Structure formats: C-alpha cells, structure tokens
C-alpha cells in the first residue's frame, strides 16, 4: 500500500518511522469525525496505536472501523500525508513494552511523563491495528 521504493512512498515510510505524533481520526456514532493525537508504530504494512481502555476512540472503532491517520504538514500545508484504512482492536498485538521499536521510539517520551515502559503498557493496554487502504500524500 505504501511503497517505500517510490518517491512519495519512501518519504511517507520514513516519516512514519520517525515522527512521534499523528492525528488518528475516528468516526463517532453521529457521523462526526473525531481527531485525537496519538503515538504509533509503523511496521511497513500496518499502524499500531495503544489506547487506554474505555476511551471514545475505541467505541468509535467498534461502531465504524473507518479511520485515518494524518501526519503534520509543513507551515504552508505541504508534506501532506493522510492514510485511510480500517481500524480494529488487535489483542494479538504485543504489549507496548514488548515491542522494541515502540520503546526505542517513545522511551524518552514515556520517561518524560514520569513513567516507564511497563507502567505505560499497563495503562495503554488496548492495541488498535490500522490496515491502510489509501494514501493521500505529496
């Protein structure tokens, strides 16, 4: 879906591996799009987000799996990267503290919150897997 061998795909792939925050957009029961800043892991095929239990995004996904993940743009609105796809809770995914790439990417941020990877994984215990179906980027 995101071809790292292509110019745009390579740029988006690199950003997904490096950027810390993206906006996850889910759809509320009344059809309202709801953006939420999230940390995420890109494995080259799917996106993985960890959520606290009982958050609205989980109810939204249960009712409507369509979701989008948007990266920040530059100050003029360039460098656009919006990935749309289907999201679902994935209880087969590893805990956040058992995913070395996730801990490597967010370890300093977790420490900045006054936590450690094990406590973070216990608090953000619901893995959401997003399977991309479309990329809009330039």
Image: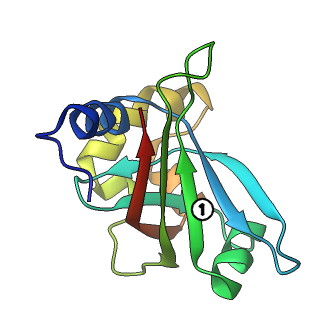
Residue 77 drawn above or below residue 104:
above
User: What residue occupies the far bottom of the structure in this picture?
Assistant: 63
The way the protein has been coloured in the rendering is: rainbow
Position above or below: 125 against 23: below
Residue shown at 27%/32% (left/top)? 14
**Nearer-the-camera pick, 70 or 121:** 70
Give me the residue at 80% from left, 73% from top: 28
Label 1 sits on a secondary structure element that is: strand
Residue farthest to the left, as pictured: 5
Q: Residues within 10 Å of mark 1 (few under 14, many from 20)?
A: many
Q: Residue at x 61, y 32 (%)?
A: 114
Quadrant of res 37: top right
What residue lies at 37% left-to-right and 49% top-to-bottom?
Answer: 41
Assign the C terminus to one quadrant of the image. top left
- Residue 84 x, y percent position in the rendering: 50, 61
Asked if residue 71 lies left or right of residue 55, the reply is: left
* Residue ID for mark 1: 51
Spot occupied by residue 85 in the image (x, y as percentages of width and height): 47, 67
Residue 137: percent from left, percent from top: 43, 39
Q: How many marks?
A: 1
For the view shown, which residue lies furthest in the right direction? 30
Q: Give the image quarter of residue 74.
A: top right
User: Is 125 positioned to the left or the right of 113 in the image?
Assistant: left
Q: Nearer the viewer, residue 1 or 35?
A: 1
Q: Nearer the viewer, residue 6 or 44?
A: 6
Residue situated furthest top in the rendering: 75
**Residue 56: percent from left, percent from top:** 78, 69
Looking at the image, residue 111 sits to the left or right of residue 63; the answer is left
Q: Quadrant of the N terminus?
A: bottom left
Q: Is residue 48 above or below residue 77?
A: below
């Amino acid at each position: 879906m995101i071809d790292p061998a292509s110019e745009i795909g390579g740029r988006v792939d690199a950003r997904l591996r490096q950027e810390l925050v993206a906006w996850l957009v889910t759809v509320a029961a009344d059809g309202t799009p709801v953006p939420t800043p999230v940390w995420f892991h890109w494995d080259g095929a799917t996106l993985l987000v960890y959520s606290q239990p009982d958050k609205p995004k989980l109810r939204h996904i249960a009712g409507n799996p369509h979701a989008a993940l948007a990266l920040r743009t530059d100050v003029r609105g360039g460098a656009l990267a919006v990935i749309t796809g289907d999201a679902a809770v994935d209880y087969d995914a590893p805990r956040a503290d058992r995913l070395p790439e996730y801990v490597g990417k967010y370890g300093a941020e977790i420490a900045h919150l006054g936590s450690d990877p094990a406590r973070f994984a216990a608090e953000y215990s619901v893995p959401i897997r997003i399977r991309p179906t479309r990329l809009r980027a330039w």
